[in-house]
Image (tube, rainbow, N blue to C red):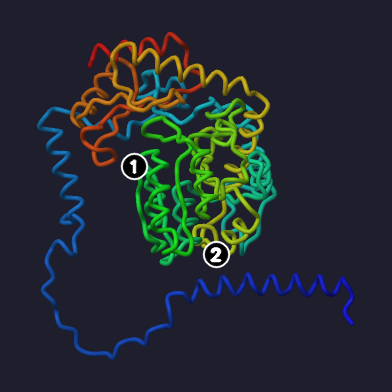
Amino acid sequence: MNSPDNDNKNAQGLGKLARLSLIDRFRTRQGPAVDAPARATSVAVNVPEEFCRFERHPAYERLLVSQSAAERFGVQSPFFRVHESVAGATTTIGARQHLNFSSYNYLGLNGHPRVNKAAQRAMERYGTSPSASRLVAGERPVQRQLEQELAEFYGVEDCIVFVSGHATNVSTISTVFGPRDMVLHDELIHNSVLEGVKLSGAHRRSFPHNDWQWVDALLGQLRGQFERVLIVVEGLYSMDGDSPELPRFVELKKRHKTFLMVDDAHALGVLGATGRGSAEHWGVSPGDVDIWMGTLSKTLASCGGYIAGSTALVELLKFTAPGFVYSVGISPVLAAAAREALHILQEEPQRVARLQAVGQEFLSLARSRGIDTGLSQGHAITPAIVGSSLKAARLSNALFERGINAQPIIYPAVEEKAARLRFFLCAMHESAQLHAAADALAQLL
């Protein structure tokens, strides 16, 4: 008869075998190898140029047309400007200091001495790269420490960190959901969610922005036709600066037995009294959201993305998500930087309060000057909607000449009539800087 110790060892061994079988199944998903074709004399085929030259690619030709049109109208490209310093409330471009409204450095932690020192210590101990996948090549303590502390911060069981925020959504959705499932997403959802749904093969339906009643009606009609259903919203929409009524979506997901995913990339450090994001802002229990997604590149002054949720979800992703299994792990340097930024966020909640005050002040200044700020609620993101891509680009360049860096968002990122400048606020912005930007914007408009 086996002892309890042996039973535990057997169970652990079976668990490992099960995990390995999942990996093997993924590796063989493409089917058996195909035999090489019989050798024969090749015959040249008349292939049109557009099918074998990037210069003739339709997307590239459309890009050239847009660039040519901008040149005819005398509009210089406002994109890919080179920053020569840390980008916070101000930045240096072309050896000139500019007021900066084009950075996700919400709490001013990018370049913080403590964050820099944490990154330097990690580099001295581990180097700059983990060199391989964490699954097969092992981990560094700081990688797992970051995940555990993020899980604790969110109030959930576990967390997994990916090397890219965009890849986090793509890999997670495409791994967990499939052709027999349906994904419902807000019409303004981030591109990474759309790409993840496309790769998953799941049925996809978008719903009018923040319209939980539309979702309720649709689920009442279609829920029974699919195995799993996922509802995806953003905690803070990066184009418009507004937040959905999260309690409404929690109630829907419970009643219709779906999963709920919240992309909190722009909400961490921004929403909630202590910057804990959408759950704190709306008073929602963290466990009522199945998938919390976030990024390390904004408030946390690093680079990468993460999923926080149940142990089962995290284990599933760790052993089957291509963006984790077949990708190098996050650099120890970046993990250490994000971890230290998370510590500062918790130790200095006054940064969050300051950011929230700045966001509300700028929104008020813009509206009082007749600027169309759309749906913005003053949560660190405020658009100035001008209704034309050409006008948005010209306005951005004109502000830049005045020493103000604010980037345009143009078609196809948004509808042509919704083309805009987007202002990202940070805790380091001063009231005088906000007044200067709002005044210049109003004058130019």
What is the three-letter code of the residue carrying label 2?
A: Thr
> Which element carries disc 2, helix, strand or loop?
helix
Q: In which quarter of the image is the N terminus?
A: bottom right
Mark 2 Cα shell of 10 Å, populated few (<14), some (14-19), many (≥20):
many
Q: What element carries label 1?
A: loop
Q: Where is residue 80 in the image (x, y as percent from the top left)?
A: 32, 35
Q: Is residue 134 above or below residue 366?
A: below
Disc ID at residue 103: none
Mark drawn on residue 320: 2
Residue plotted at (32% across, 10% down): 439
Image quadrant where one finds the C terminus: top left
Q: What residue is shown at x 17% (from left), y 28% (from top)?
A: 75
Q: Is residue 24 left or right of residue 370?
A: right
Residue 428 percent location from the top left of the image: 51, 18
Say whether disc 1 or disc 2 marks the residue closer to the N-terminus.
1
Image location (x, y in percent) of residue 184: 40, 51
Would you place residue 47 above or below residue 406 in this image?
Answer: below
Indicate whether 372 appears above or below 317.
Answer: above
**Which circle marks residue 208 in the picture?**
1
Q: In which quarter of the image is residue 377?
A: top left
